Image (spheres, helix red, strand yellow):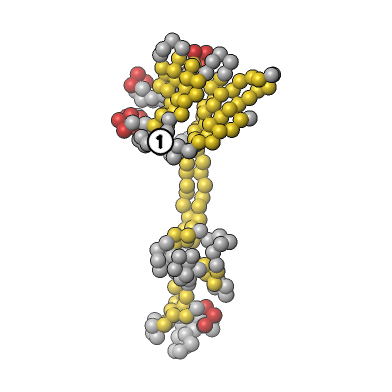
Amino acid sequence: MINTRPLVYKYICYLNDGTTQEQYSKERNYKGLKFTDIKQDKLVKFGLYPFSQDLAEKVTKAGTEARALPFLPEYEIEFDGNKRLIYYRQCFISQQEYHICGACKKEFQYDSSVKTLSSKYPSPICPECKSHDDFYCKKCDKSYTFEDTANGLCPICKGHMQRRKTTSTQYSREKRWNIYIMGQQYIINGRNVCVLLTIDETGNCILTTK
């Protein structure tokens, strides 16, 4: 999958001859090192590190968007001849629907926890300020709940009223995020074992064994 999020981590491979292989380096004009080019037979340590501001700018200029978040934690794992490196990155995409209250401007998700003004014209009730859609008579300068009106007519002047959509308008946006998976693969008593670190864009990590 084509990456659609700025990278926040880059890797460095440490080899048994004292040299390193960096994912982004001046020697490759800050183009990414292919995973297949990692010298796994010489690998003694693999680390994920946040970008410096200077490197992030150079990598971005070379065609891969990167972001410097120096407060992120570093992650390192060591290797010997019986362990193999696992490393890959996944980008996730999801559609998120939400509402914005026209009265207090607060954003909220319209789920089972949100009360609804039930009527012929249902409207979510803002969890923050309790506002909801109503009918408004411009001539009388009065507003009514849906139950107080008959077919959208003003109870006083019998004129047509305007429905004011304070909370019912739904918006959508696309959410994207990366996760970084690094770990080791080795054999124990004839069984293939994988120990993986799953790291999100804020540096949080989950350890799993398969």
Where residue 109 appears, as percent x and y from the top left, is 51, 58
- Position of residue 156 relative to residue 210, above or below, is below
Q: Quadrant of the C terminus?
A: top right
As rendered, which of 18 and 99 lies closer to the eye? 18
Answer yes or no: is residue 152 visible.
Answer: yes
Residue 50 or 205: which is nearer the viewer? 205
- For image coordinates 41% across by 82% down, the residue present is 142
The residue pinned by badge 1 equals: 72
Q: Position of residue 111 (x, y in %)?
A: 56, 60
Position above or below: 159 against 36 = below
Could you tell me which secondary element the residue under label 1 belongs to?
loop
For the image shown, how many numbered marks are present on the structure?
1
Q: Residue at x 41, y 12 (%)?
A: 18
Residue at 46%, 82% (x, y): give it: 160
**Position above or below: 182 against 117:** above
Residue 46 on image: x %, y %: 47, 22
Using the rendered image of the protein, determine whether residue 65 is visible from the camera's viewpoint. no
Query: In the shown orientation, is residue 23 left or right of residue 194?
Result: left
Q: Is residue 194 left or right of residue 12?
A: right
Residue at 52%, 78% (x, y): give it: 146
Question: Most extreme residue toward the left, as rendered?
Answer: 54
Amino acid type assigned to the residue bearing label 1 in the image = Leu
Find residue 161 and report its image quarter.
bottom left
Q: Would you call the spot at circle 1 few (<14 residues within 10 Å), some (14-19), or many (20 or more)?
A: some
